[in-house]
Image: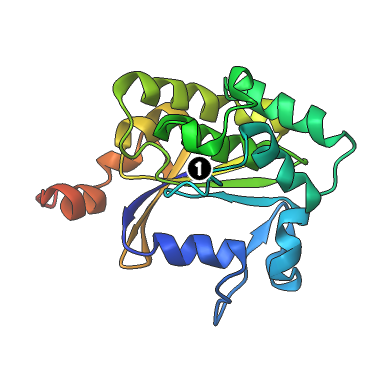
Amino acid sequence: MARFDRGGKTTLINVLSGFVRPAVGSVRTDGRDLAGIRLQKRATFGIRPTFQNEQVVENLNAADKVAAVLDNVLTNGGRARGSSRALDFVGLIGKANTLGRDLNAFDRRMIEIARATVGRPKLIMMDEPGAGLAQDESERLRDVIKSINGFCGAQVLLVDHDVDLISATCATALVLESGSKLAYGPTAAVPADPKVRAAYLGIIEAAA
C-alpha cells in the first residue's frame, strides 16, 4: 500500500513504530493490536521502518550493518547467512565488506531496505525511499520494492510524493490531507478521484 502525502505522514509512521500513542482508535498489523506491543518489542514482532536519511555507521561494513538487526529479532538462521541473503536481494552482496563511509547515497538507501527484510518482518515502512535518486537508481528501487513480499513475506507501506513510483509498486493507495483521509482505493483509480484532483491539481469538477 502507498500513501500520497499532504500532511500526517510522520505521525502515521511514528504511531506504527510506537514512538507516538494514538489518543483514540486502534492500529492493527497482521491482525494484532499494536497497542499491546511495547516500542522495544515492535522490531521483534516484525515492524520495520526505513528512513529517508540513512542511518549508516561510517566505520561499520555493509554486512555487519545488516547483521546488527538480527540482535533484536527472532531468526532461525545465523547472522552471516541472514545478512548475506538480504544484501544479495538488494544487489549489494559485492559490497558486503565495504565500510559505510565508502558507500554512495543509493547504496546506503538499499542497505536500509536490506536491514528491514531480515528476521521475518511483517510490515516494512518506507519513508520517501526514492527521494534524490537518479532514473536508473529509481528503476532498481522499484524492482526491489515489488519483490519484497515474495522475498520475505512482508507487507510494504510506502510513503512518497512520486506518483510514478507508487503506481509501479502499490496495489492500493491512501491520500491524506492534514492528517485526514482524502481518498483510498486501488492505486490506478485514486489519482482520478475528484477530491484528489482538487487538492493536488486545483481542478474543481462541475457537478453532473
Please say if 95 is above or below 82. above
Q: Quadrant of residue 146?
A: top right
Residue closest to the eye, 105 or 206: 105
Q: Residue furthest bottom?
A: 23
Q: Secondary structure at mark 1?
A: loop
Residue closest to the eye, 32 or 165: 165
Please say if 55 is above or below 66. below
Q: Give the residue pinned by disc 1.
A: 1
Q: Can you give x and y, in whole percent of width and height, for residue 22 in the image? A: 55, 76
Q: Residue furthest front?
A: 59
Q: Can you give x and y, in whole percent of width and height, for residue 175 in the image? A: 36, 52
Residue 208 left/right relative to 92: left
Please say if 187 is above or below 168. below
The total of numbered circles placed on residues is 1
Residue 174 left/right relative to 57: left
Q: Can you give x and y, in whole percent of width and height, for residue 46 in the image? A: 72, 50
Q: Is residue 155 visible?
A: yes
Residue depicted at 33% across the width and 40% down the height: 131
Q: Can you give x and y, in whole percent of width and height, for residue 199 in the image? A: 19, 55
Q: Residue furthest right?
A: 76
Residue depicted at 58% across the width and 76% down the height: 21
